Amino acid sequence: TQDNAPIHTAGKITENKITIINWPANSPDLNPIENIWKISKDNIKKNEIVPKTVDELKVALKVEWEKIDVAILEQVTASMSRRINTILESNGGPIKY
């Protein structure tokens, strides 16, 4: 997916004749990383030590990212067909993801 920013639509994409899919620039219900960020955020909130600086937050996020099971990533990715169908059924409206 692309957001049509020039940096994402030039160079290798053109050279390799890659087809660009029109994708909403701001559509979190179609962006699986939003689920992963929520999981990470929820896990950080459960920790006894709350990050107080940007550097501490970066470390906490890295730790949580490395804990995410591949099965979760596969599950979130596998949900895309259902999400797209639900959005189509709602005539392009937002969905609960």
Image: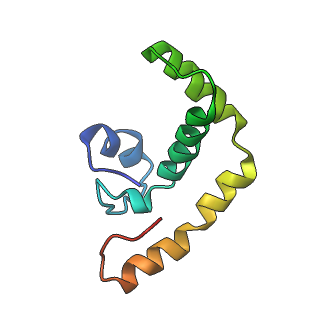
Q: Is residue 78 left or right of residue 22?
A: right
* Quadrant assignment, res 88: bottom left
For the point 37% across and 62% down, which residue is it? Answer: 21
From the viewer's side, name the closer residue of 39 and 72: 39
| 55 to 28, vertically: above or below | above
- Does 18 sit above or below residue 97? above
Q: Nearer the viewer, residue 33 or 63?
A: 63
- The spot of residue 58 in percent (x, y) is 51, 21
Disc tally is 0
Q: Is residue 66 left or right of residue 80?
A: right
* Image location (x, y in percent) of residue 67: 71, 36
**Residue at the image position 39 percent from the left and 71 percent from the top:** 95
Residue placed furthest toward the front? 48
Is residue 71 left or right of 41 when viewed as pictured? right
Residue farthest toward the bottom in the current orientation of the protein:
89
Asked if 15 appears above or below 46 in the picture, the reply is: below
Task: Tell me what residue is drawn at x 30 percent, y 37 percent.
Answer: 7
Q: How is the image coloured?
A: rainbow
Which quadrant would the N terminus be assigned to in this image? bottom left
Q: Is residue 17 above or below residue 94?
A: above
Which residue does the image show at 33% across and 61% down from the upper left? 23
In this rendering, would 84 be left or right of 11? Answer: right
Q: Nearer the viewer, residue 19 or 93?
A: 93
Residue 28 % position (x, y): 38, 56
Residue 15 in percent (x, y) is at: 40, 45
